[in-house]
Amino acid sequence: MKHGFACETQGNLFFDVARIIRYHRPRCFLLENVKNLVSHDRGRTFSIIRNVLEHELGYCLHWRIIDGKGFVPQHRERIFIVGFLDKNDFSFDTLSLPDPLSGPRLSAILHPENGSEKPESHYTVGKKAAVSEKYTLSDKLWKYLQNYADKHKKAGNGFGFGLCDHDSVARTLSARYYKDGSEILVSQGCDKNPRRLTPRECARLMGFGRPGQSDFKIPVSDTQAYRQSGNAVLLPVVEAIASHILPHLQN
């Protein structure tokens, strides 16, 4: 698969962003991308981005790679880029972030399944709002994922499923989660196959709501919901950066 500007479907998105910035000339912007943006193509991709934003558009840039697991139980490293049209003393060094080693665990976003939240759609059922059986992996899929992991382990590779419990921090949620859910599987004990996260749990994992809450509407199919969550930005990280930006715009 091609990445960066060589990707025919996504490689030109940055230039669409640059076109929008050039037209509207905002006083400030905030961009997010995968952390490997800095090192992609030996740094050439990020060099092009900096050249366009700094020299062609005239913005002062600041960037930092932040792991969101201080906010949510997910290891998700992303680069955040802030650009100001006017020079000021903004710095990521003074951004206050929670300790990633003391962040929440998966239990913070899972359905409690004890009746403390109301059943929702087809995600949870019954008086205790237990997770629907549709999210439990079939014997066939579970066996395939185990065999796949064993194959790559013997070959010395690190590919495989990510089995979690309530005290875990999950791997990065991706847009492909709808395919088999392999990167984040919730253990249901030795006598039962693990399950995928529900779309509601995926939304919470990205910072959109908490257990017992369903204010964030999910009006789309499970497949589309998984894709949207995997492609989303971590809401609490963006909120923290936006709050850090605000005083510099007010001044």
Image (cartoon, helix red, strand yellow):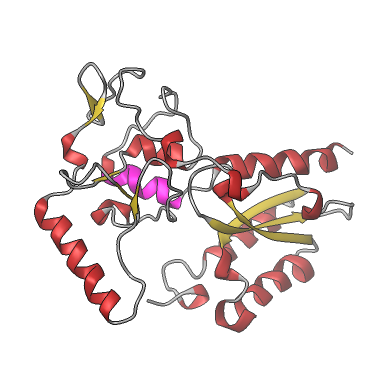
Image point (12%, 49%), residue name = 138
**Residue 200 location (% of width, % of height):** 36, 34
The residue closer to the viewer here, 239 or 145, is 145
Instruction: Decide which of 3, 111 is in the foreground and name it.
Output: 111
**Left or right position of 175 against 125:** right
| Residue drawn 15% across the image and 44% down it | 191
- Closest to the observer: 89 or 51? 89
Placement of 18 over or under 113, stated as above or below: below
Return the x and y of residue 106 as percentages of the image width and height.
43, 41
Residue shown at 46% from the left, 74% from the top: 3
Q: Position of residue 155 (x, y in %)?
A: 28, 82
Q: Is residue 94 visible?
A: yes
> How many numbered marks have been drawn onto this rendered protein structure?
0
Q: Is residue 190 shown above or below 108?
A: below
State whether the magenta stretch is mostly helix, strand or loop: helix
**Side (left or right) of 141 relative to 162:** left
State whether residue 171 is above or below residue 229.
Answer: below
- Residue 215 placement, left or right of 95: left
Whether residue 24 is visible, yes or no, is no
Is residue 68 depicted above or below 133 in this figure?
below
The stretch drawn in magenta includes residue 211: no
Q: Is residue 187 left or right of residue 92?
A: left
Q: Position of residue 164 (x, y in %)?
A: 35, 49
State the residue lying farthest toward the front.
190
**Image quarter for residue 216?**
top left
Q: Residue at x 80, y 54 (%)?
A: 93
Question: In which quadrant will I find the C terminus?
Answer: top right
Report the magenta residues as a range.
223-231
The N terminus appears in which quarter of the rendering? bottom left
